[in-house]
Amino acid sequence: MTPGWLLLAIAHRQDVQVAMDSILVLSDILFSSCWRLCIKTSDDGGKTWTKIRSFNEPYGTEGQILYDRVSRSVLLQFPDRNLQFRQKPGAILQIRSIDGGETWSAPVEVNLGSLFAPFRPIGLSVGPGAGIQLSATNRYHANRLLFAGHHGPYQYDMIWYSDDMGHTWTFAQNAPHTNKPAQLWQQDEIALAETPDGGVLASMRNEVYHGKGLCNCRGLARSSDGGSTFGPAHPALVLVGPICEASMLSLPTKAGGRAIFHANPGHGTDTESKSPPNGRASGTVRRSIDGGVTWEASVRLNGNKAFAYSCLTHVPQTGFIGLAFETVLPGSDISAKASANNIIFTLVPQNFSSDSRTEMYIV
């Protein structure tokens, strides 16, 4: 992998896993021909993409990915659904690419030590969403890598980190340190982002905050020490949306802080469904400059049309961020209730203050 702004898109057949870093975007795309993990790349900022190809046979069909700037490699972690490591059922496996996803190493177990024992043999679902790397200037843990996953549907989320380029891993603990892994209860698919003070913000899919009289919104949890410990989950009243995945991206600002961008279907209702417009629709990107305490601006991308899983990423175009998202293309011969049949890649201006024009490309 060279610093030439290669965008890497990875898909599998049913759920979106998304990851992003300085030269990487991962998005799960509903390719009808993809029955395992599949990959596309773009070297022109997302305008054109290579043909789809499959990889990672026979290890898995899901996972989470990130780009490590220090080792200049791509890491993909996934649960061992096919029991390649039969002596350790429920294992999490990791593969690595040093050539931009052209070739991958053999899988190795992500050893999380004795703290992982209670989660076997069911194990953890890794992703969907983005693994992240903290900035080189993070006050607590420069260049730390973080992955996340969930245990069962809407049971709890967990986060684990590495400070040695992905060779060894440790569970984040409850805040304050309790020597027990942090379990973010009643949450599901999770997105992470670095905050201006060196902490980590977690935004989570859930069911517990949805329904009549509730906020119909995301769950949030926060680390104040670079991801070593996390506090409990609580509702994020501004981050409304249907029950769905979301993504986040953290970028440095000219003023020396960090801006967090958050993308998800943009409205939640008491009677929501997966179908647009009363469900997975109205794609919305929000921006925060205070670590997700408040959200100062938002932009809606596609009216009330379909918007499902998504991925935010850095792009080479100055002043923009990239967003890949599932939608239904105009004129598609599918049910009007469908929330996705293809994926669009769009550029979003970082300094938006209201609805802005975007450039969209089919991945």
Image: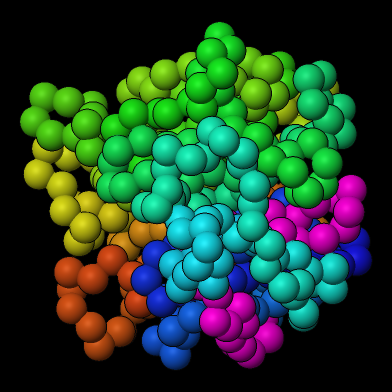
Q: Is residue 239 left or right of residue 344?
A: left
Quadrant where the C terminus sits is: bottom right
Residue drawn at x 42%, y 38% is 118
Taking depth in this image into account, of 296 and 184 the one nearest to the observer is 184
The stretch of residues the image draws in magenta is 49-75
Task: Specify whether residue 208 is painted magenta.
Answer: no
Q: In which quarter of the image is residue 345?
A: bottom right
* Residue 346 in view here: no
Left or right: residue 100 versus residue 266 is: right
Q: Which quarter of the figure is the N terminus placed in? A: bottom right
Question: Where is 346 relative to 195, above or below?
Answer: below
The spot of residue 104 in percent (x, y) is: 74, 75
- Residue 124 appears in the figure: yes
Q: Which of the 4 image quadrants contains residue 103?
A: bottom right
Percent coordinates x, y for residue 330 in the rendering: 34, 78
Q: Which residue is drawn at the image coordinates 81% and 19% (left, top)?
A: 139
Q: Describe residue 332's horizontal placement relative to residue 92 as left or right.
A: left
Residue 176 location (% of width, % of height): 56, 9
Image point 55% across, 23% down: which residue? 173
x and y percent of residue 89 in the render?
A: 46, 59
Closer to us: 14 or 247: 14
The residue nearer to you, when weighing 294 against 87, is 87
Vertical comparison of 124 with 261: above or below:
below
Q: How is the image coloured?
A: rainbow
Number of callouts: 0
Q: Residue furthest front?
A: 87
- Please name the residue shown 30% across and 84% down the image: 332
Front-most of residues 124 and 236: 124
Query: Magenta includes 72?
Result: yes
